[in-house]
Amino acid sequence: MSAEPRSSSEQQRALARREQILCAAANCFRNHGFHGASIAQISKAAGMSAGHIYHYFDNKEAIIAAIVERDLEYLVTLTAELRATGNIRDAMIEHVAEGVRKNLEPAEAGLKLEIAAEAARNPHVGDIVRRADEVCRGSLADTLRAVRQADGHADDEATIAGMTEVIAALFEGLMIRGIRNPGMDRDAVIRGFRETVRGVLKQPS
């Protein structure tokens, strides 16, 4: 009777240790870059041995894959929640403020840009990032399609794909702008983003 609770407890501890490693690795990647961050540094930041790190992850690329997967789960869950609302358009517009603030957060932007830079150099990391982006784009496209269908539009896949890329480029571009111009008027940016998203959603078929 006690085996199941122990198994559940062990699983929770393993998940907590895994998250501890991911948080430590994220900080190291931000501070030292992917190549500058060693497993020894990550293990020190995580407060555990390097052997313990390797128990959960084979290498740094596997850690990046887990970080990317964690971000993907957040975005897919978010778009699914938007589609489940009574008014998807209003829910998307309302969420713009959170999306702007999240992408302007220095730690968030620094980590994602470091991973993107490594993806440009490392084919394996590039594959990880592109596979995740494909899933994310698909979920966002489903959300945009639902809004457009509710408005009576029958868009082809190319139209939805174009709208998806515009929305993605808007928010991803904020990460670079936040680094180049950290003192920007965020409220003004949020207002501009809301109007832009409205315009994308209302474009003719």
Image (tube, rainbow, N blue to C red):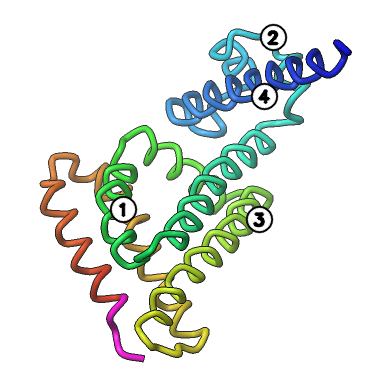
Residue kind at label 2, given as amino acid type: Ser
The structure residue drawn at horizontal position 22% and vertical position 69%, both measured from the top left corner, is: 196
Task: Tell me the magenta residue range.
Answer: 201-205
Q: Quadrant of the N terminus?
A: top right
Residue matched to label 4: 15
Sequence-wise, which precedes: disc 2 or disc 4? 4
Q: Are marks 3 and 1 in contact (CB under 8 Å)?
A: no
Sequence-wise, which precedes: disc 3 or disc 1? 1
Q: Closer to us: mark 2 or mark 4? A: 4
Q: Closer to us: mark 3 or mark 4? A: 4
Q: Position of residue 75 (x, y in %)?
A: 49, 51
Frontmost residue, 40 versus 172: 172
Q: Of the numbered discs in the image, which one, if any, rests on residue 5?
A: none
Q: Of the numbered discs in the image, which one, if any, rests on residue 127?
A: 3
Q: Is residue 58 left or right of residue 132?
A: right
In this view, 61 is above or below 86: above
User: Magenta span has 162?
Assistant: no
Residue matched to label 1: 95
Q: Secondary structure at mark 4?
A: helix
Q: Residues within 10 Å of mark 3 (few under 14, many from 20)?
A: some
Q: Is residue 180 left or right of residue 8?
A: left
